[in-house]
């Protein structure tokens, strides 16, 4: 590695590089296992029988076949690992699936999600949905159900403790936005309704996430393409029916961005 100064968050995209002779076969058991675990193929090219390696992203639940002479991003750790080694690493992360980011702590703090509905009607619908799902308002001197509806600032939702509230000033709202912590209500519904997400909610979430990578006009044109629609339909069906072949809206959007 050269002496050029690098910073966390500004490095090249990484994924696990898995190497095994069986991966020369497109029907290798490892590929079938990935699909059973909910990973989606997101490679840029097809399968090469001369390649005994593949790239896998745990974060986005996607994988791609290796290609002679081409590196799709950087290999985590700078080198390949075996299938058995990858499964050990994957199981560690799988143990925390669906939990807060610091669930490894014995007494981890709340897992706050910042949601910013576009208007009062959507804000009210969000709160009604949360309360239907058993969430309670975090009531204090300045926070209650009505103040959450009336507030111009993002709604805060703690998935772990099933409570909600709202930010109280411009400073806190700006801080959350600057760190890309605020999501749209469309993203929230699709990501946290899980298999209960409706088709329109799922597509709306994919669209909102894609807008982080592409211009709005590009997103609309891209989503209108037949191949794009087919990929989203397949992922949605697997996601809502839990067949192991789908992907959540975030992984689907990232996959589409990689294929753009």
Image (cartoon, helix red, strand yellow):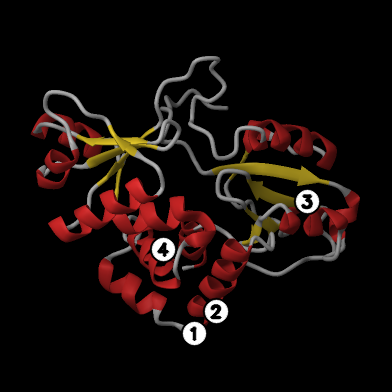
Relative to the observer, which residue lies in front, 179 or 243? 243
The residue sitting at 49% across, 24% down in the picture is 102
Disc 1 crowd rating (10 Å Cα; few below 14, some 14-19, many 20+) is: few
Give whichever of discs 1 and 4 has the lower sequence position.
4
Point out which mark residue 124 bears: none
Q: Which residue is mark 4?
A: 206
Disc 2 crowd rating (10 Å Cα; few below 14, some 14-19, many 20+) is: few
104 in relation to 155, above or below = above
- Look at the numbered disc 3 and give the secondary structure of its residue: strand
In the picture, measured across the screen, residue 16 lies left or right of residue 26, that is left
Q: Which residue is mark 2?
A: 230
Q: Nearer the viewer, mark 4 or mark 3?
A: 4
Give whichever of discs 4 and 3 has the lower sequence position.
3
Q: Are marks 3 and 1 in contact (CB under 8 Å)?
A: no
Where is residue 190 drawn, in percent x and y? 43, 58
Point out which mark residue 226 bears: 1
* Number of numbered tags placed on the structure image: 4
Q: Which residue is mark 3?
A: 53
157 in relation to 71, above or below = above
- Look at the numbered disc 4 and give the secondary structure of its residue: helix
- Look at the numbered disc 1 and give the secondary structure of its residue: helix
The residue sitting at 69% across, 30% down in the picture is 92
Q: Are marks 1 and 2 in contact (CB under 8 Å)?
A: yes
Q: Distance of mark 3 from mark 1, alpha carbons?
A: 31 Å
Where is residue 59 drawn, in percent x and y? 56, 44
Give whichever of discs 2 and 3 has the lower sequence position.
3
Q: Are marks 2 and 3 in contact (CB under 8 Å)?
A: no
Disc 3 crowd rating (10 Å Cα; few below 14, some 14-19, many 20+) is: many
148 in relation to 126, above or below = above
Q: Nearer the viewer, mark 1 or mark 4?
A: 4
Relative to the observer, which residue lies in front, 16 or 129? 129
Give whichever of discs 3 and 1 has the lower sequence position.
3
């Amino acid at each position: 590695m050269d002496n050029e100064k690098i910073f966390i968050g500004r490095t090249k995209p990484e994924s696990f590089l898995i190497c095994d002779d069986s991966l020369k076969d497109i029907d290798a058991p490892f590929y079938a296992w990935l699909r059973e675990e909910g990973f989606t193929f997101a490679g840029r090219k097809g399968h090469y029988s001369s390649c005994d390696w593949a790239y896998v992203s745990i974060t986005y639940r996607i994988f791609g076949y290796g290609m002679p002479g081409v590196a799709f991003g950087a290999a985590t750790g700078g080198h390949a690992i075996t299938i058995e080694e990858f499964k050990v690493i994957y199981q560690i992360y799988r143990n925390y699936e669906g939990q807060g980011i610091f669930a490894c702590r014995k007494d981890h703090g709340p897992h706050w999600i910042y949601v910013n509905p576009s208007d009062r009607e959507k804000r009210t619908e969000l709160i009604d949905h949360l309360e239907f799902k058993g969430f309670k308002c975090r009531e204090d001197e300045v926070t209650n159900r009505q103040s959450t509806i009336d507030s111009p600032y993002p709604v805060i939702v703690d998935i772990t403790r099933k409570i909600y509230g709202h930010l109280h000033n411009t400073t806190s709202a700006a801080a959350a936005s600057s760190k890309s912590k605020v999501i749209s209500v469309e993203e929230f519904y699709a990501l946290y309704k899980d298999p209960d997400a409706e088709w329109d909610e799922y597509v709306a979430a994919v669209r909102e996430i894609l807008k982080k990578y592409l211009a709005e006009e590009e997103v609309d044109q891209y989503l209108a393409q037949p191949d794009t629609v087919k990929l989203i339909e397949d992922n949605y069906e697997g996601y809502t029916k839990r067949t192991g072949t789908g992907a959540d809206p975030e992984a689907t959007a990232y996959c589409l961005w990689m294929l753009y």
